[in-house]
């Protein structure tokens, strides 16, 4: 590969223009909307020819369930609630004793009035009958009036006493509003045994008129009791298994049969425009949320067709899986491994976008579950906790911990929704078991997908990086066998890079693995690099011109890229190889060439031969490698005796890279550089163990 080829290949990758980016974004957006809409409408496409039936029609054939389904039966639920409501008796206020006493006083007043009418010598019988008929509290017949006027005084007194006694006894207990007849119907059983038989009907008639309610209906308490008993009735779910007969041929279709047919979408004629519009609007809203993040916060992603297609494919695959698992509304819906999507995406698009994707997926899962807030929350909580507990690490155990977090989060959300409606703890067991299995399935599915994606794409997944970090990888073995010094240098630099990446919250796993491969090109000519030579041994550059030496040193980048391509290393790892020297000068050979040119009385014709081809680092991780590589080499070469000398070397190397504009595209901030500098000093102190400089050392420098 000629000089500059690597940098040119890096810099001249296809970059679509403005209209190209718009067309690419539009195409991906249309594909996304179409895919999501088709999945949301899938049950309508797969539904068989609908039945044009109504309640009361005769079934033309045996109608069976085309799939398993558990649905809420509104008819059975409403019937159960109405029955429970009807079973609640009216609630009455306690009996008011004052009303009974009032009626007794009223009976005595009426008795006294009748006695006065009977004793009136100036009124004839018709006039007296008129007076008695005018008593508003009594409804006397002409026969009863005649009997009251014709009885002797002794019998009249006996009637009056009996009426008062009957009222007192009848109203000693509750006389409920609207149920007075229940009390008056028992008055005949309360009549005294010595009361004259002919006068009993008259006494009962007068008493019945004066017995009134002393306990009124409490409508508020009654309604509250009925509402409570209705609230205690949970939704009644009906379950049909695939192939189960709903209604047999020749039978009348009743309301319950129609409800089952509607739940199975067996009565729907065809897709309505409302259904299509609803699915399309939902898809468009999902796209807007995801596209806004990409276009505003990560515009470069819009140019990566492969990445966009992979993201879309994974999302649609999980949404399709949800379509087959979630709408059943039975406990198996809790097995939907939505968290696996978050575990996969986190590996190569980061936390922020993954969180957004999980929120969108959770909303669509709720859509598929007929607007179930429960399924939305369980999917969201499980996925977000899984992502929150995952970080790029060299240990697979983090994925299992993330799966456990997803299970715990989903189980907690389930309990929150079950507590108000499910009082029987045994009903929690099966759903909680399925959610626990969900966490395990999510982890397993995520690991399988990460392995597959890492094997067939150029994306660096955590599993792929863990595999590349193995010391028995062919390229690592080659470096160990051909360039022992370089391999040792690589390990020491990798420790520096990993520590600094963790300190500034960069991708420490990617940074370490990229560092392990950044110098693999030195295996082609190991003896020309100082770390592979024995101290005091011959220098292979001694008989070479500065230009030839510079070419050999610079070629380790091109040789490394060749090896990386041959062994199919991901592009992100290749970036560490071609960016770790940026466009830095090889000062030793540049100075040597300038001195030779000056000695011959000429000027150096092409200084670019003594500069690396670049490009400069375009990520925080490759920039950290550039700094760590320079600092480790300088400290190893200068053998500092004190911590202060290490600090001086590290500060000098970092400042040089800044002055030479090597960090302009890296994304590192000044605060990041300060943290990196401090991290390097601490790590290098531990690696090279400089002596503490005691006061007497200044007087006896040869000591130690």
Image (cartoon, grey):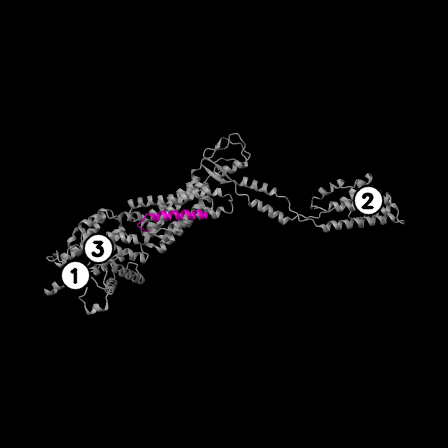
Chief secondary structure of the magenta span? helix
Residue 692, given in percent of the width and then of the height, sits at 24, 64
Determine crowd level at label 1: few under 14, some 14-19, many 20+ residues with C-alpha closer than 10 A: few
Outermost residue on the top side: it is 250
Nearer to us of marks 3 and 1 is: 3
Q: Residue at x 64, y 45 (%)?
A: 90
Instruction: Give the residue pinned by disc 1.
Output: 588
The answer to whether 550 appears left or right of 207 in the picture is: left
Helix, strand or loop status at disc 3: helix
Q: Which residue is mark 2?
A: 159
Task: Tell me what residue is drawn at x 61 percent, y 42 percent.
Answer: 86
Q: What residue sits 84% from the left and 42% below the top?
A: 147
* Segment colored magenta: 392-413
Tag 1 secondary structure: helix
Locate residue 405, reporting x and y percent: 39, 49
Examine the rendered structure and indicate whether residue 195 appears above or below residue 683: above
Relative depth, front residue between 297 and 685 = 685
Q: Can residue 143 be found in the magenta stretch?
A: no
Label 2, label 1: how far apart the Cα atoms are: 138 Å
Q: Which residue is mark 3?
A: 489
Q: Nearer the viewer, mark 2 or mark 1?
A: 2
């Amino acid at each position: 590969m000629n000089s500059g080829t690597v940098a040119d290949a890096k810099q001249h990758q296809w970059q679509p223009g403005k209209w190209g980016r718009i067309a690419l974004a539009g195409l991906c957006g249309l594909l996304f909307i179409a895919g999501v809409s088709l999945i949301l409408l899938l049950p309508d496409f797969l539904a068989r020819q609908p039945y044009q039936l109504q309640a009361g029609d005769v079934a033309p054939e045996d109608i069976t369930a085309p799939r398993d389904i558990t649905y809420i039966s509104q008819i059975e639920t409403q019937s159960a609630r109405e029955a429970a409501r009807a079973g609640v008796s009216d609630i009455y206020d306690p009996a008011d004793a004052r009303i009974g006493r009032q009626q007794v006083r009223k009976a005595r007043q009426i008795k006294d009035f009748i006695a006065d009418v009977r004793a009136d010598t100036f009124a004839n019988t018709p006039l007296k009958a008129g007076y008695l008929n005018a008593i508003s509290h009594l409804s006397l017949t002409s026969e009863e009036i005649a009997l009251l006027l014709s009885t002797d005084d002794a019998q009249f007194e006996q009637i009056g006493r009996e009426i008062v006694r009957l009222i007192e006894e009848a109203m000693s207990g509750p006389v409920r509003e609207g149920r007075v007849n229940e009390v008056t119907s028992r008055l005949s059983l309360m009549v005294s045994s010595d009361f004259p038989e002919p006068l009993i009907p008259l006494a009962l008639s007068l008493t019945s008129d004066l017995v009134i309610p002393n306990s009124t209906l409490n409508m508020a308490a009654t309604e509250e009791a009925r509402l409570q008993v209705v609230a205690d009735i949970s939704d009644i779910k009906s379950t049909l298994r695939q192939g189960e007969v709903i209604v047999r041929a020749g039978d009348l279709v009743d309301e319950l049969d129609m409800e089952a047919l509607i739940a199975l979408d067996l009565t729907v004629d065809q897709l309505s425009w409302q259904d299509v519009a609803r699915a399309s609007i939902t898809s468009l809203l999902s796209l807007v949320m995801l596209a806004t993040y990409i276009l505003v916060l990560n515009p470069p992603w819009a140019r990566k067709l492969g990445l966009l297609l992979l993201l879309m494919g994974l999302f649609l695959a999980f949404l399709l899986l949800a379509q087959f698992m979630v709408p059943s509304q039975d406990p198996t819906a809790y097995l939907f491994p939505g968290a696996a999507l978050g575990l996969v995406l986190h590996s190569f698009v980061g936390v922020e976008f993954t969180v957004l994707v999980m929120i969108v997926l959770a909303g669509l899962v709720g859509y598929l579950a007929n607007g179930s807030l429960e399924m939305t929350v369980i999917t969201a909580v499980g996925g977000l906790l899984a992502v929150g507990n995952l970080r790029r690490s060299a240990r697979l155990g983090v994925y299992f911990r993330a799966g456990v977090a997803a299970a715990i989060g989903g189980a907690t959300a389930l309990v929150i929704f079950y507590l108000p409606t499910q009082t029987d703890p045994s009903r929690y067991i099966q759903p909680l078991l399925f959610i626990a299995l969900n966490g395990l399935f999510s982890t397993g599915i995520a690991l399988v997908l990460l392995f597959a994606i890492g094997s067939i794409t150029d994306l660096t997944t955590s599993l792929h990086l863990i595999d590349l970090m193995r010391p028995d990888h062919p390229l690592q073995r080659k470096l160990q066998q051909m360039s022992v010094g370089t391999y040792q240098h690589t390990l020491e630099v990798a420790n520096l890079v990993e520590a600094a990446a963790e300190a500034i919250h960069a991708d420490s796993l990617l940074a370490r693995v990229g560092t392990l491969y950044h110098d693999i090109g030195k295996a082609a000519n190991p003896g020309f690099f100082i770390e592979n030579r024995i101290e005091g041994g011959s220098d292979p550059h001694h008989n070479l011109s500065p230009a030839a030496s510079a070419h050999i040193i610079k070629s380790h980048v091109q040789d490394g890229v060749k090896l990386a391509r041959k062994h199919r290393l991901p592009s992100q790892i290749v970036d560490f190889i071609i960016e770790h020297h940026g466009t830095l000068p090889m000062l030793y050979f540049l100075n040597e060439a300038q001195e030779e040119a000056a000695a011959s009385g000429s000027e150096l014709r092409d200084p670019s031969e003594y500069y690396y081809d670049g490009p400069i680092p375009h990520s925080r991780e490759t920039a950290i490698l550039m700094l760590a590589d320079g600092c480790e080499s300088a400290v190893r070469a200068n053998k500092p005796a004190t911590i202060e000398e290490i600090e001086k070397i590290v500060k000098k190397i970092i400042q040089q890279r800044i002055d030479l504009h090597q960090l302009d595209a890296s994304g590192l901030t000044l605060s990041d550089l300060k943290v990196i500098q401090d991290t390097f000093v601490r790590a290098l102190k531990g690696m090279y163990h400089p002596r503490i400089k005691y006061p007497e050392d200044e007087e006896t420098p040869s000591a130690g």
